[in-house]
Structures are given as C-alpha cells and as structure tokens.
Amino acid sequence: MTKADVINQIAEKTGIDKADVTASVEAFFSIVKNSMSGGHNIYVRGFGSFINKKRKKKIARNISRNTAIVIEEHYIPSFKPAKVFINKIKSSDKVKQLAEK
C-alpha cells in the first residue's frame, strides 16, 4: 500500500476532499520528522510509538580493504507498535493466509 492508497481510502471513508487529506497526511509526516529530528519521541495511543533509538559506537570491517572502520554512536528512527496493534495483526485471518503461501 502506498501513500496515495492511504490518502484515497481516508478520502473515501471520511468524505473529505483528497487535497485536504493529502495536506493533512503530509503535515503529519512533516511533524513526525521534525519532532524526531529535534530529539522528541511521538506516542500514539493504540497505534504505536515513533522513537529515536541509540546505536552504540562499534568497530566494523571493510572486507575488501581489510581495514577497521569506527562507527560512532548515533540515533536511528524506529517504530514500536502498540499491543493493540500487534494483537490485531496476530489475530488477522488474512495475514495468516498470506503467511501460509
């Protein structure tokens, strides 16, 4: 499913114009990016959390040159789904059917 598909479904379910839905979705994504880049986590009850995860400093290997590379500690964006969200996916018959294929 793409962002355009999400926008179309929201517009159909709510009856709101696609342009307004697109602006809302884009604003949501912009707020998430700006808040997370500012060091803030976002918690959406019943859906999940957008959090900044800290990665420790580590030494990696460049196999082709046989050299060591130091990767400094850094943060990466991560999504942690809520328990309600996880349970809905686990109990979904459609997901089970797709997993069996």
Image (cartoon, helix red, strand yellow):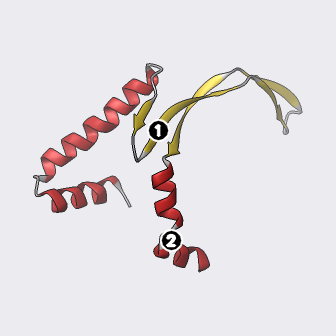
Compared with 91, 39 (above or below) is above
Q: Specify whether 36 is left or right of 29.
A: right
Residue located beneath label 2 in the image: 95
Residue 37, located in which quarter of the rendered image? top left
Q: Looking at the figure, which quarter contains the N terminus?
A: bottom left
Q: Specify whether 30 is left or right of 49.
A: left
Please state the horizontal and vertical placement of residue 25, each as a whole percent of the image: 26, 43
Residue at 47 percent of width and 70 percent of height: 92
Residue located beneath label 1 in the image: 49
Please state the horizontal and vertical placement of residue 27, each as a whole percent of the image: 26, 35
Label 1 residue SS: strand
Residue at 37 percent of width and 32 percent of height: 32
Compared with 100, 64 (above or below) is above
Q: Looking at the figure, which quarter contains the C terminus?
A: bottom right
Label 2 residue SS: helix
Please state the horizontal and vertical placement of residue 51, each as a whole percent of the image: 51, 32
* Measured Cα–Cα span from mark 2 to mark 1: 22 Å
Q: Tag 1 or tag 2, which sits nearer the N-term?
A: 1
Residue at 49 percent of width and 63 percent of height: 89
Q: Specify whether 14 is left or right of 77.
A: left
Please state the horizontal and vertical placement of residue 47, each as a whole percent of the image: 41, 47
Q: Specify whether 3 is left or right of 66.
A: left
**Which amino acid, by three-letter code, is at mark 1?**
Ser
Q: In the depicted view, which residue is nearer to us: 67 or 81?
A: 81
**Which amino acid, by three-letter code, is at mark 2?**
Val
Residue at 42 percent of width and 35 percent of height: 43
Marks 2/1 in contact by CB < 8 Å: the verdict is no
Q: In the depicted view, which residue is nearer to us: 72 or 85?
A: 85
